[in-house]
Image (spheres, rainbow, N blue to C red):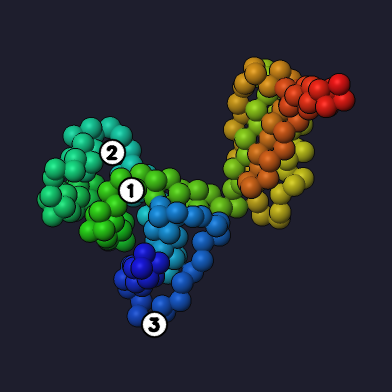
């Protein structure tokens, strides 16, 4: 049932009656937030409004973080849904959101999906990174990397990217890994930490005892 509603939603978002074909997201996403974000991506692609919608959702998500009264209003179960829908529409108009973005928010509100709005905004932002060929990468080390080592790591990671892709690298520090590094690149994961190696050695010694 939810899948059917989202399929209808994707078609409603599109103002072009000539094309009901769904444009697939460049990234596989799951869950309720993923389905809404994918439907919005398809509709925004058809209207060539991807960047506009991305900006809208980012603005609304930030507003929810800074405006506690709005967040409390939407999350309050004692407030009737009709009042929340009206309030959400008013906020969308005040923020001057595009019709696509406003339609998404109102549709989610009608389906009592208020709490999923920030997650949908986050997933849509991730989809847009993939759309632009940006591959999210995380590098965790026990100590901060110096500039030379960071440059070597970036060069090595670039070797795993496809043509047209670029790594968006976030460097993290976690002393508990002892040494080495832990890397995630898109959907790939590699644990080269000293802590993991020591744990494996310990298990081997215990097994042979």
- Tag in front: 2 or 3: 2
Numbered label tally: 3
Q: Does the CB distance between marks 1 and 2 fall below 8 Å? A: yes
Which quadrant is the C terminus positioned in?
A: top right
Q: Does the CB distance between marks 1 and 3 fall below 8 Å? A: no
Q: Which residue is mark 1?
A: 117
Could you tell whether 106 is left or right of 87 in the image?
right
Point 41% across, 52% down: residue: 33
Q: Count residues near mark 3 (Cα–Cα under 10 Å), then give few for <14, some for 14-19, many for 20+.
A: few
Q: Which residue is mark 2?
A: 64
Q: Mark 2 or mark 3, which has the lower sequence index?
A: 3
Q: Which residue is mark 3?
A: 18
Foreground pick, 124 / 198 = 198
Q: Count residues near mark 1 (Cα–Cα under 10 Å), then give few for <14, some for 14-19, many for 20+.
A: many
Residue 42 appears in which quarter of the rendering?
A: bottom left
Which quadrant is the N terminus positioned in?
A: bottom left
């Amino acid at each position: 049932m939810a899948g059917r509603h989202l399929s209808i939603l994707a078609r409603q978002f599109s103002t072009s009656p000539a094309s009901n074909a769904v444009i697939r997201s460049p990234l596989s996403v799951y869950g309720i937030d993923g389905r809404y974000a994918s439907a919005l991506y398809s509709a925004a692609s058809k209207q060539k409004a991807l960047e506009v919608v991305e900006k809208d959702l980012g603005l609304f998500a930030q507003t929810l973080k800074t405006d506690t009264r709005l967040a409390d209003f939407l999350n309050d179960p004692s407030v009737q849904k009709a009042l929340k829908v009206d309030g959400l529409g008013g906020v969308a108009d005040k923020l001057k959101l595009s019709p696509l973005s406003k339609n998404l928010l109102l549709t989610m509100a009608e389906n009592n999906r208020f709490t999923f709005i920030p997650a949908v905004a986050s997933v849509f932002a991730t989809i847009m990174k993939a759309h632009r060929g940006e591959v999210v990468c995380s590098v965790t080390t026990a100590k901060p990397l110096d500039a030379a080592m960071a440059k070597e790591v970036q060069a090595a990671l670039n070797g795993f990217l496809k043509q047209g892709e670029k790594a968006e690298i976030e460097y993290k520090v976690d002393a508990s890994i002892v040494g080495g590094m832990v890397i995630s690149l898109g959907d790939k994961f590699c644990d080269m930490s000293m802590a993991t190696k020591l744990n494996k050695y310990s298990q081997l010694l215990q097994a042979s005892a």
